[in-house]
Image (tube, helix red, strand yellow):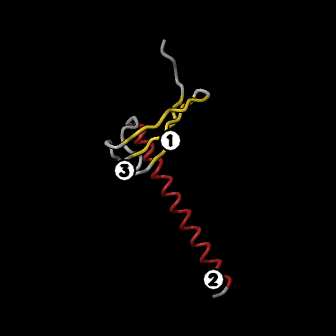
Amino acid sequence: MSEDADVQKIETRNQLVAALEDEWDEQFEKAEAKYIEAGGVECLYCGSSAGLEGGSIDIEFGEAHQEITCSECGRDWVDSYKLVGVIE
C-alpha cells in the first residue's frame, strides 16, 4: 500500500472520529439541557428517576459541586451549583 493511500485512510478515519465527536457533543448538550430543565431528577444518561444518588456537596467560592451516581446504568457525573441569591 502506498504512503498516499495510508495518509488518505488516516484522514478519512480522522473525519469519521470528528463527526462522531460532534454527534456525541450535540446529544450530550440535549441530554444536559433536559436534565437541568427537569431539575436533575432523571439520569443524565439513561433517564431513570429511580436510581440517582448524590454524594457530599463541596462548596468553594460561591459554587458547589456534587457527584451524582445512577445505580440503574452505573454512570456518574458532577452537578455544579452556583450561588444566585440569599434568603434572609
Q: Nearer the viewer, mark 1 or mark 2?
A: 1
Decide: is 46 above or below 80. Answer: below
Please give left or right for residue 22 compared with residue 39 in the image.
right
x, y (%) of residue 23? 48, 57
Q: Give the amino acid at mark 3.
A: Cys
Q: Are marks 3 and 2 in contact (CB under 8 Å)?
A: no
Label 2: few (<14), some or many (≥20) within 10 Å? few
Q: Label 2 amino acid?
A: Ala
Residue topped by disc 1 = 78
All told, the count of numbered labels is 3
Q: Which residue is mark 2?
A: 5
Q: Residue at x 57, y 67 (%)?
A: 15
Q: Residue at x 38, y 41 (%)?
A: 52
Q: Secondary structure at mark 3?
A: loop
Q: Residue furthest right?
A: 3
Q: Tell me residue 70's x, y (percent).
A: 39, 46
Mark 3 vs mark 1: which is more N-terminal? 3
Label for residue 54?
Answer: none
- Secondary structure beneath disc 2? helix
Q: CA distance from mark 3 to mark 2?
A: 41 Å
The three-letter amino acid code for the residue at tag 1 is Val
Residue at 51% x, 53% y: name it. Answer: 25
Q: Which residue is mark 3?
A: 46
Q: Position of residue 72 (x, y in %)?
A: 35, 49
Q: Nearer the viewer, mark 3 or mark 2?
A: 3
